[in-house]
Image: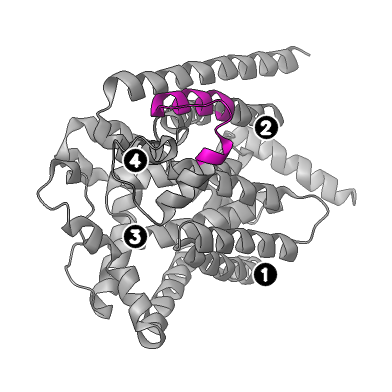
Amino acid sequence: MINSISLKQRKLVLVILSFVALVLGKIAVVYILPTKYYYDNLRINSMVVGSGSMKAWGGSYVVAANIFRSINYLGLTTMYEWSLVLGVLLTTAIVVFLFFKSELSLLQELFWLACIVLLNIYIFTIGKDVIQFFFFYLVLLAILIPNVSIGMRVSLVAIIFIIEGLSFRSYFMLVAVFFIGIHFLLKYFHSKMDKVSILQLALTVVVFVYFFLIVSSIVFPAEYQSIVGSRANANSAREGSADAKSAIINLIPGNGLLISLINYPISAIRMMIPIELLFRGVSYIPFIIFQILITVFYLRIIVAFVMKPYIKTEYILSFEVFTAFLLVSFFFEPDFGSWVRHEMAAFPVFQSFVFSSYCGLDKMQKTKRFETRIAVQRRGI
């Protein structure tokens, strides 16, 4: 009973601190961060209210403006009003998640609060990223559907990404392709796990990406050029600008196949372990710590998968979705600021395994869980 009450009290404290984190995020939006962080948000708000304060753009901006215009029942007119309303509603929606989880470790709790702050700075406001957050939320719901086969859930997730790719952000078509490929790769390794190491698994994923690049360069040369050249094209217009201080510049310039094959794993390491930002200013230190934490949790779930304990299907599928998202992002992200925004938009998926017992239990708890599972198996339950 004492342990039960203690756990409830700890969750209640974390819920309260979550709303404190919400307030901190909104204070940063209104009083601390410069407007350059919200050009897209301000532009979409201008398109929604028709103020003409910023030039209207086409493509996904029109889609986003139409969506927000259609749901603006409260008559919101400023980005800050949208930020407050969406922050309260969506923070409340994800805080409910805490009541369905077992006890989190201290590191997980701190990471949770950091996520709430970043979500309320970057995502929970009028803009394209909150729409992407909604698509990832739909993906999580598809993963969690009970009494449905894994094949059906995989199909639903792929369909959601295809719809998003066709209607909003085209590169999510590629996320759908990578997700299906990763799913079948892990399904194969799951049956061979006793003979496979983490290194072999990682190398196989790299070979999968390389195979995709090589085939694309031959069969779809135009699409290949748009993929491998997107980062350089995005950064070329901002060269020398103060806004491009956190730009991710390819180590080797050019779009040739060999150059792309060399740059890709380098970009992956740089984005997952962004220690280079230490040389760009101390203000980036919180981001470096945050990103490294994501990387640590991501590696923990890989270890859990390779060690072959019993892992719920929802964790495996969430891991596969996030892996596909990462693999595609390593191609496109032009700067570390955009990277953290888009990564936080994927929160509904990566929170599924980051805040699981596989990423938070200490050694003693893990051992107890393992011994309990073995006992259950021996009883034939």
Taking depth in this image into account, of 201 and 113 the one nearest to the observer is 113
The magenta-colored residue range is: 68-90
Q: Report the label total.
A: 4
Taking depth in this image into account, of 234 and 139 the one nearest to the observer is 234
Q: Which of label 1 and label 2 is nearer to you?
A: 2
Screen quadrant of the N terminus: top right
Look at label 2 and name its amino acid: Lys
Residue 190 coordinates in the image, percent (x, y):
64, 65
Residue 381 coordinates in the image, percent (x, y):
89, 49
Does the residue at mark 2 contact the one at mark 4 (Cβ under 8 Å)?
no
Q: Which residue is mark 2?
A: 101
Does the residue at mark 1 contact the one at mark 4 (Cβ under 8 Å)?
no
Mark 3–mark 2 Cα distance, whole angstroms, equals 34 Å
Look at label 4 and name its amino acid: Arg
Disc with the residue nearer the chain's start (3 vs 1)? 1
Residue 85, magenta (yes or no): yes
Residue 302 visible in image: yes
Disc with the residue nearer the chain's start (3 vs 2)? 2
What mark, if any, has residue 332 been given in the picture?
Answer: 3
Q: Which residue is mark 4?
A: 43
Q: Which residue is mark 1?
A: 191
Q: Residues within 10 Å of mark 2 (few under 14, many from 20)?
A: few
Q: Residues within 10 Å of mark 3 (few under 14, many from 20)?
A: many
Disc with the residue nearer the chain's start (2 vs 4)? 4
